[in-house]
Image: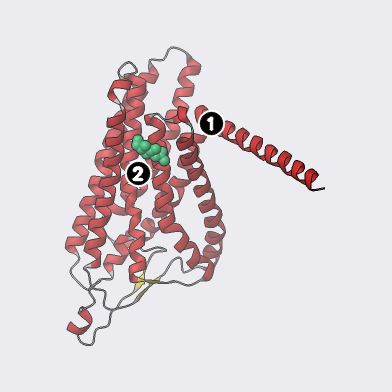
Amino acid sequence: MSIKSNEEDGNQTEPITFILLDFNNEDLQVLFSVLFLPIYLVTMAGNILIILLVVNNQHLHTPMYFFLGNLSCLETCYSSAIMPRMLVSFLTGDRTISVHGCFLYFFGFLAATECYFLAVMSYDRYLATCRPLHYVMLMDGRICIMLIAGSWISGSLGISIIIFLVSQLRFCGPNKINHFFCDLTPVIRLSCDKTDLVEMTAFIISSIGTLPPLLITISSYVGIIKNIIRIPSTTGKQKAFSTCSSHLTVVACFYGSLMIVYVLPNMSSLSDLKKLFSLFYTLLTPLVNPIIYSLRNKEVKDAAKKTFKTLTALASQYECLQKQVINVIN
Ligand SMILES: *[C@@H]1O[C@H](CO)[C@@H](O)[C@H](O)[C@H]1NC(C)=O
């Protein structure tokens, strides 16, 4: 936001706040407040649980679980950038948001990092199923760290560029955002500067963020499916297919919604559709990913059980100690 523009333009005043026009519908408003809070809490609980399990269990220190842990970390971050502010405005009915507060929402662009993680994870699974003999060599610790760091860096770079460009724009009047959070396109539309450069950059960043990982993901799953077809036993086949199809469903929902929101042209006739689909990647994916990828997985379940047992053991020891202390005092 360039502060100096106030003086330059004389009588033009910059809006200090934006107003979010979410649904223009009271019933939906109530429904969404009731739905979003539990969704957010479950999302946080699921993802944080996975991070804790991965970090604290030695036998989950493998590339696959590092990717999962980092994915959960990422989802915790960007849901927390978007959801709490959205919930507050739903619950209090306060639709105003400061222009700088709005920028926080661009962290939704971390979704690009998620695309890379999903691609890396599908490639990892591809190597594990189709090249099991070379897997350990192909996915060693160094490569694993490079892939993870690369995903984080490219996502953060994208956000920094977007935030920088948008912060150079002047907003000099219209301040009604037709969305329930400050998504990039509706915000850009309010600027009174030429926005071609920002729109072009955003388009390029979102295309680079989604298309190459999508291609990697699709080709990895094609390889995995080919391999599954060769499994001789029917039960083995079914099991492998069920895991694979649940992953594919999540991946398809995620990419589909991202592309509808960011890659489709910026037409007002599409804005309601985009509003709805932005819920998919902000709300739905972070909620279902931990369930689909980890909590259905035997190793993670075992780790969770073990941790839970340790905790209950600690609790009973603590109770025991408490009793002893009470006895001593009495
Ligand atoms: C993320 O990946 C790094 C590098 O492999 C790993 O050391 C770290 O434990 C991972 N983080 C989580 C939360 O799993």
Residue 45 % position (x, y): 53, 47
Residue 264 % position (x, y): 28, 53
**Closer to the observer: label 2 or label 1?**
1
Question: Is the residue at mark 2 in contact range of ligand 1, meaning its CB lies under 8 Å from it?
Answer: no
Residue 130 % position (x, y): 33, 20
- Count of marks placed on residues: 2
Q: Which mark is residue 226?
A: none
Question: Is the residue at mark 1 in contact range of ligand 1, meaning its CB lies under 8 Å from it?
Answer: no
At 55% across and 34% down in the image, what residue appears?
Answer: 304
In the rendered structure, the answer to whether residue 25 lies left or right of residue 189 reads right
At 30% across and 45% down in the image, what residue appears?
Answer: 152
Residue that sits furthest to the right in the current view: 330
Q: Quadrant of residue 232?
A: top left
Q: Is residue 264 visible?
A: no
In the rendered structure, the answer to whether residue 328 lies left or right of residue 142 reads right
Which residue corresponds to mark 2? 114
Which quadrant of the render holds ligand 1?
top left
Which residue corresponds to mark 1? 303
Tag 1 or tag 2, which sits nearer the N-term? Answer: 2
Q: In which quadrant is the N terminus drawn?
A: bottom left
Q: Is residue 85 visible?
A: yes
Which residue is at the front of the view, 274 or 302?
A: 302
At 47% across and 60% down in the image, what residue appears?
Answer: 84
Q: Quadrant of residue 3?
A: bottom left
Amino acid beneath label 2: Glu
Q: Residues within 10 Å of mark 1 (few under 14, many from 20)?
A: some
Work out how far the residue at label 2 is from the one at label 1, CA to CA, in angstroms: 25 Å
Which residue is at the front of the view, 25 or 63?
A: 63
Q: Residues within 10 Å of mark 2 (few under 14, many from 20)?
A: many
Please determine whether, in this image, residue 234 is positioned above or below residue 321.
above
